[in-house]
């Protein structure tokens, strides 16, 4: 039987998504299920990522699995010049599953080809972060009761933000989504994604500032506008305070609307939003544990 | 029910202390009690501290719990500019208990307010390190048979040493303690603590060198004199060799006297003391495991 | 009863080797044996070594043990000036077994003297790495069916390579080995080891390049030629491409011949060798887990 990996969100079908989301709901009800008893998982973080790593390691521990690995490349053999090929082959000999974060695009796909055991991509550079997308979908499903007919506002860096690209691809598989993109011109949603939506006949709208349009949103998905993305620092200074969500902007938003953010945030959501019941980003982080338990169970055929 | 935290040694009553010390004695008899089965503990060390971290992680493992976390801020989201508020909220969503070491004073109290789960302060800058104080008390109780009528000599850096301040506060709750402070003028016990003792009618004496006075001691509590505490390096050079405890100074000390040190030591206790039966600092470190098991059990109501 | 340590390969007798290799075969058949249940092992890596560390930690986890420790000295108390003596005494109070990697020769022996619990040397500078030798022996036994009458070619850095020195010492205890050394003059096998072989009446041959002689080999043991070993960079440039094993050199080697390498490799084995069935270095790495389980079981008398 061919091993399952999770490298790109587009590797999975709508049925896979729904199966994983169903499992996630089951783990949320009962997080401590010792399905990984006697199994060892490698957690290979070639670059630091506290949230993703701790979320995965919580998921593995609550499943009764054991963890080996590293949290940055400094304490790995990479510093001795070992190739990704050799590191992957070596670790693949030790464990039952590899979770990998690596700064290079395509590194996860390559590791999955080399390894004898399943590989889960925990982020490969600007490319893919599919477990984030699945936890985003779980958060939408949980708060909206459905993945159909969702009006999603994506705000901030829509050019480099891999999370918004993957979420766009995934949500396009469901009925009648509407996308609204709010970004500075320099960080607008790339043409290829807009073309993809056009070809599927999915509606989308573009805006350059946060205004009363958000009153139509079911989901507001905030992302960070990072200074280092701008060629010209003056351009950054111009826009840095424009894409900040504040509590007073939310007065007339829909009752079912929820605000998501992949975190960490810097200042793009003002702290005064945190106490608004529509702020959902910390619960979203918690959903990451259940979703990752579900992904592991799905990949290793544990349930 | 309000969650319990352990942030400052003064948060706890004499009854709490005694309850924890009783539990510690029980864990010393039987360290492997799987009371944390199915639970995950976050070990968040925003600055390195091998001893405290390994002691806590041993305690958690012997209780059957699982651990996630980091051993320095470098591999945390802090490097992406995330606030302590957000890191704490995020981790609080994953785990059943947070153990936190942070360089900023007050950080633990703040984290405890933000987190939904209990927080144990494993040291917040120069402020508090309450689990150290409890293991110090356990060591005193174990070696002296009582916490009443103890004559404690505190030697070294009494100005910045948080362990001596906390121990002073805690021991002042018991009957008839006597304190002796031996420190250079630059590192003398601060006025506020002496005032506190005066108001409680507790006797204390001050000295500027180690001499035959220590023959009255039940406990000698050594601390490190750190170079970086001195404005003027010449002042440091003057005193650095004065506050070194040597075996030949111990000849006439009381048979029940024991030497404590929070460790790590640099040179303030000469290695020739190590083989003296009055040297107790390594046993003291071992007591840290049992005491931390007791603190965790107390906070999570496991016993 | 005196505690057992594993510091140098020469501490152990031929009977010890055979007992450990027998246990390793048992663990290979059934790697998940919870013999370390309720035990805590310290994994103290004062310098990074992914392979050795992950292999040990996999072994401990598959035995049901728990792990505390650090993966580099940066997050240890060493940065506060603590001596190896004090760190070892402290950790020895927490755990049931210490696995230690340290850059200084002799550090493991010293730690074993200080610690109350057994110490396994996971590499002490250029000195010893005995668990590597045992996994090398297990790999030879598994692929050759015997440890007697083995013709071993050692290639690369035979001067500084501790793994080849230890393997030479260990294999010399078995019947009728033949050693072939292929190295540049600057990195030739030291006189002391050749003298040792002479005194035991063991045959050895020296070569300065890889040629058809390897067709007699049962085992080819490759090692890395490290630039930093050369005084004169020009000498390194001269030899760096000479000691590279390529697939086309293997056409006439014996059917039972297998290629070992302690890993990580840089370029001394060309990737085109990887798919040759005589390439055994990744399986060898896997054997490391079973061998280390066996060593732990032997040292703690678990089987």
Image (cartoon, coloured by chain):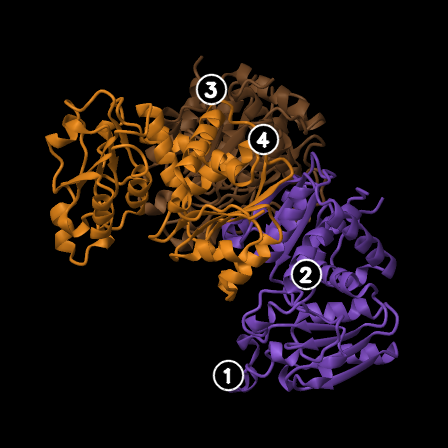
Chain colours: A brown, B purple, C orange
The residue carrying mark 1 is B233
Under circle 4, the secondary element is: loop
* Chain for disc number 3: A
> In this orientation, which residue lies closer to the viewer: A15 or B245?
B245
Tell me, yes or no, if residue A185 can be seen here.
no
Dot in front, 4 or 2: 2
The residue carrying mark 4 is A65
Separation of residues labelled 2 and 1 (CA atoms): 32 Å
Mark 1 is surrounded, within 10 Å at the Cα level, by few (under 14), some (14 to 19) or many (20 or more) other residues, namely: few
Dot in front, 1 or 3: 1
Q: Is residue A46 left or right of residue C248?
A: right
Above or below, B147 against A159 in this view is below
Separation of residues labelled 4 and 1 (CA atoms): 52 Å
The residue carrying mark 3 is A4
* Chain for disc number 1: B
Separation of residues labelled 2 and 3 (CA atoms): 50 Å
């Amino acid at each position: 039987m061919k091993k399952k990996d999770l490298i790109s969100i587009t590797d999975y079908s709508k049925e896979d998504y729904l199966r994983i989301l169903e499992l996630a709901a089951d783990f949320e009800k009962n997080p401590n299920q010792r399905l990984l008893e006697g199994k060892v998982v490698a957690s290979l973080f070639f670059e630091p990522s506290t949230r993703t790593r701790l979320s995965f390691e919580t998921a593995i521990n609550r499943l009764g699995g054991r963890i080996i690995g590293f949290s940055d490349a400094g304490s790995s053999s990479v510093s001795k010049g070992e190739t990704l090929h050799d590191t992957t082959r070596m670790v693949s000999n030790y464990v039952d599953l590899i979770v990998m974060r690596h700064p290079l695009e395509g590194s996860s796909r390559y590791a999955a080809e080399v390894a004898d055991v399943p590989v889960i991509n925990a982020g490969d550079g600007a490319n893919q972060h599919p477990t984030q997308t699945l936890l985003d979908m779980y958060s939408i499903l949980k708060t909206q009761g459905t993945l159909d007919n969702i009006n999603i506002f994506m705000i901030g860096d829509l050019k480099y933000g891999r999370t918004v690209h993957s979420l766009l691809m995934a949500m396009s598989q469901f009925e009648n989504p509407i996308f609204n993109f709010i970004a500075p011109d320099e960080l607008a949603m790339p043409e290829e994604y807009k073309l993809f939506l056009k070809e599927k006949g999915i509606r989308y709208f573009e805006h350059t500032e946060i205004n009363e349009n958000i009153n139509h949103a079911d989901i507001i998905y905030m992302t960070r506008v990072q200074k280092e993305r701008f060629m010209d620092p003056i351009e950054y200074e111009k826009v840095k305070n424009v894409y900040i969500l504040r509590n007073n902007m939310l007065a007339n938003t829909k009752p079912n609307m929820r605000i998501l953010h992949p975190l960490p945030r810097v200042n793009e959501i003002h702290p005064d939003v945190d106490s608004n019941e529509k702020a959902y980003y910390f619960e979203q982080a918690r959903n990451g544990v259940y979703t990752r338990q579900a992904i592991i169970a799905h990949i290793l055929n544990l349930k």
